[in-house]
Image: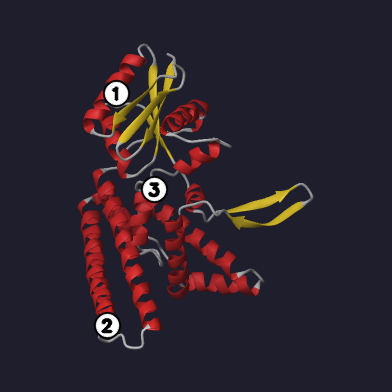
Amino acid sequence: MKKEFIGIDVSKNTLDVSLHFSKAHKVFSNTAEGINKLLAWADEQVKGFERAFCFEHTGIYSLLLCEFMEQRQLIYYVIPGLELKRSLGIQRGKNDKVDAQAIARYACLFEQELTRHELPSATLLKLKNLLSYRSKLIRQRTAHLNHITELKKVLLQTQDNPIVASSQKIVEMLTQEIRQIEKLMGVQIKRDEKISQTFNNITSIKGIGLILAATLITSTEDFKAFRTWRQFACYAGIAPFEHRSGTSIKGKTRISPLGNRTLKTLLSQAAATALQHDPEIKLYYHRRLKAGKSKMSTINVIRNKIVSRAFAVAKRNTPYVNLVKYAA
């Protein structure tokens, strides 16, 4: 059966829809009623053809659309915005209709490389939302802390300053809210037996705490979205790549600037913690430095070690065993 590729440009209020082969285009509201009309219009336009929907990952704006696709068991692909942008090459001008056409074309060209999307479980969605909200609260707290620091540098007297006092109260309130969100995350994890088991296994690794564990679980959909830890390391932006071509370009092997910055930061913090509390990691770190390796490359190797350990214990469904303490 022939297949028609339907590209959808998702925004806060609207859904621009374009068909790749027939070139039909229409705009719908990003609501339950609008999505029902979109699917009915697609049925009418694509009679006798198999349909494949494709749209960018836009967080909460595309969540309702995903839920409708899941309910009707439709084939749909969700692609990262940066991946789509880089695939388009040089463009002149931009609008929602052009973007929808580009998405439909992308789905047609790269169909063999795309993986059919499935919504994660309700627990993972709730956990992801809590992590996102926590990050927002931390950014707000950091902004107020920076404001307090700047005021203390400028003002001679800050003890009775109402702005400083107000900012400090906001910081305290945000800190309490962050702790409350972390408690809710723990409760949410314990409610799901499978996720709770995964959480207990990966937190047995030195360096992995609540936030990194929850981020790993949601990013990997409980370690099902990536086949190997190396694939995930590439996604996180900690996998080293060669940089050379012919005889003229002989750059050092380095990590890519592309990747999940949140994961990269959390894994750096985990590496620092492991370096303090894991004798095996500490020994490995100093041995590499003595061999002339740089500190940053060694830290990156430790980040990769933590990821590989997390995948190993998650796949085995057993806690991490530190073999060093059993060595003769």
Q: Dot 2: what SS?
A: loop
The amino acid type found where label 1 is placed reads Leu
Q: Dot 1: what SS?
A: helix
Task: Identify which residue is drawn at 21% across, 64% down.
Answer: 180
Q: Quadrant of residue 42?
A: top left
Query: Of all residues shown, which one is farthest toward the top?
Result: 48
Left or right position of 119 against 322: left
Q: Circle 1: is it few (<14), some (14-19), or many (20+) Cα within 10 Å? A: some
Q: Earlier in the sequence, mark 1 or mark 2?
A: 1
Whether residue 5 appears in this view of the structure is yes
164 vs 277, nearest the viewer = 164
Q: Position of residue 143 (x, y in %)?
A: 35, 68
Task: Identify which residue is drawn at 25% across, 49% down.
Answer: 126
- Residue bearing the label numbered 2: 161
The amino acid type found where label 2 is placed reads Asn
Left or right position of 251 against 296: right
